[in-house]
């Protein structure tokens, strides 16, 4: 073999190795491709998985909540949602929401009416609850950044002294647990209730905390060099971030996957009857991808 042929052979072998590495994934189902499940929304957000695997999500500028079913597709669930953004189901299967029309944390009752869980902090309205995660004992962590909304009354302004993260225990009350972020946004916790991941989207960083018995946070540790609009976690402990694409990190902070979508992802969860469908809200569209991993409660 001549030197030229040998060089070409090595290049081809190298490229083949890259190709095989790119086509091999431990968490994405073999042969699975990104599918568009819906389109023509204004801005999709807040996917929340019900016990039956259906996913509820918001189209916030249009003040609507839709439901995705892997068999029947997408249907309108409610119009007039309090401008719901991030959502999550509690242990009573009530859909809890960050309703930023009036800067509230609330849930929908059996008649789809908003019931306020909490509003305000130290006598002032919250900036605008954005995303939330509910602990195994129904405590609620939520982020409170500030994005000015067109539906607010004239003169509405940011009034809290920091863009914080808060904890509301099941028995009521509120505690600010993070006060040193530029703009907190996505967050998710582990199913054992011991660890919380929170993204500072403006600083393009995600941090990891240990959850204390009283709901406060300790041991702030760097987790990933990306912020995130929305987050989820799978049954292997892998954490999914949305920042330009979906980034998947192991619990130890090792990058496992970079998943591209036709539109920039906003939020993410794992839904479907088997909880093995990666469900992504991405601006005007909804996308799905079959996975080898599953979601967690």
Image: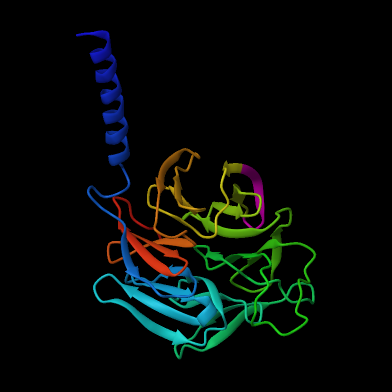
Nearer to us in this view, 95 or 91: 95
Give the side of residue 283 with respect to residue 106, left or right. left
In the depicted structure, whether residue 216 falls above or below residue 103: above
Range drawn in magenta: 213-221
Q: Residue furthest top?
A: 2
Q: Is residue 219 magenta?
A: yes
In the depicted structure, whether residue 180 falls above or below residue 142: above
**Residue drawn at (73%, 53%) of the image:** 180
Image quadrant where residue 116 sits: bottom right
Give the side of residue 174 with respect to residue 110, left or right. right
Residue 134, position in %: x, y? 52, 65
Total marks placed: 0
Q: Residue furthest bottom?
A: 111
Nearer to us in this view, 91 or 112: 112
**Residue drawn at (45%, 91%) of the image:** 111
Residue 25, position in %: x, y? 31, 42
Give the side of residue 233 with respect to residue 142, left or right. left
**Residue drawn at (72%, 62%) of the image:** 163
Residue 294, position in %: x, y? 33, 55
State which quarter of the image contains the N terminus: top left
Image quadrant where residue 67 sits: bottom left
Q: Is residue 67 magenta?
A: no
In the depicted structure, whether residue 101 falls above or below residue 9: below
Image quadrant where residue 8 sits: top left
State which quarter of the image contains the C terminus: bottom left
In the depicted structure, whether residue 273 falls above or below residue 77: above
Residue 85, position in %: x, y? 54, 73
- The colour scheme used here is rainbow
């Amino acid at each position: 073999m001549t030197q030229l042929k040998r060089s070409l052979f090595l290049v081809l072998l190298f490229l083949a190795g890259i190709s095989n590495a790119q086509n091999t994934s431990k968490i994405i189902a073999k042969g699975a491709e990104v599918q568009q499940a819906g389109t023509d929304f204004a801005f999709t957000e807040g996917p929340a998985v019900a016990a039956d695997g259906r996913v509820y999500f918001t189209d916030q500028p249009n003040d609507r909540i839709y439901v995705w079913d892997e068999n029947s597709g997408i249907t309108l669930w409610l119009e007039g949602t309090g401008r719901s953004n991030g959502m999550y189901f509690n242990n009573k299967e009530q859909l809890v929401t960050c309703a930023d029309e009036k800067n509230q944390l609330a849930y929908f009752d059996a008649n789809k009416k908003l019931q306020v869980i909490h509003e305000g902090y130290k006598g002032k309205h919250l900036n605008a609850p954005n995303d939330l995660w509910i602990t195994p004992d129904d405590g609620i962590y939520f982020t409170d950044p500030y994005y000015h909304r067109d539906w607010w009354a004239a003169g509405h302004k940011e009034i809290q002294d920091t863009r914080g993260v808060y904890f509301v225990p099941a028995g009521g009350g509120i505690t600010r647990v993070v006060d040193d972020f530029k703009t907190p946004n996505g967050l998710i916790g582990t199913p054992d209730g011991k660890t919380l991941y929170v993204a500072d989207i403006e600083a393009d960083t995600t941090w990891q905390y240990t959850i204390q018995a009283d709901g406060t946070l300790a041991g702030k540790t760097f987790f990933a060099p990306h912020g995130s609009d929305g987050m989820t976690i799978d049954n292997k402990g892998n954490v999914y971030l949305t920042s330009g694409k979906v980034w998947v990190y192991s619990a130890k902070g090792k990058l496992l996957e970079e998943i591209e979508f036709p539109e920039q992802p906003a939020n993410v969860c794992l839904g479907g009857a088997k909880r093995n469908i990666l469900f992504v809200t991405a601006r005007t569209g909804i996308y799905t991808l079959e996975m080898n991993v599953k979601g967690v409660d």
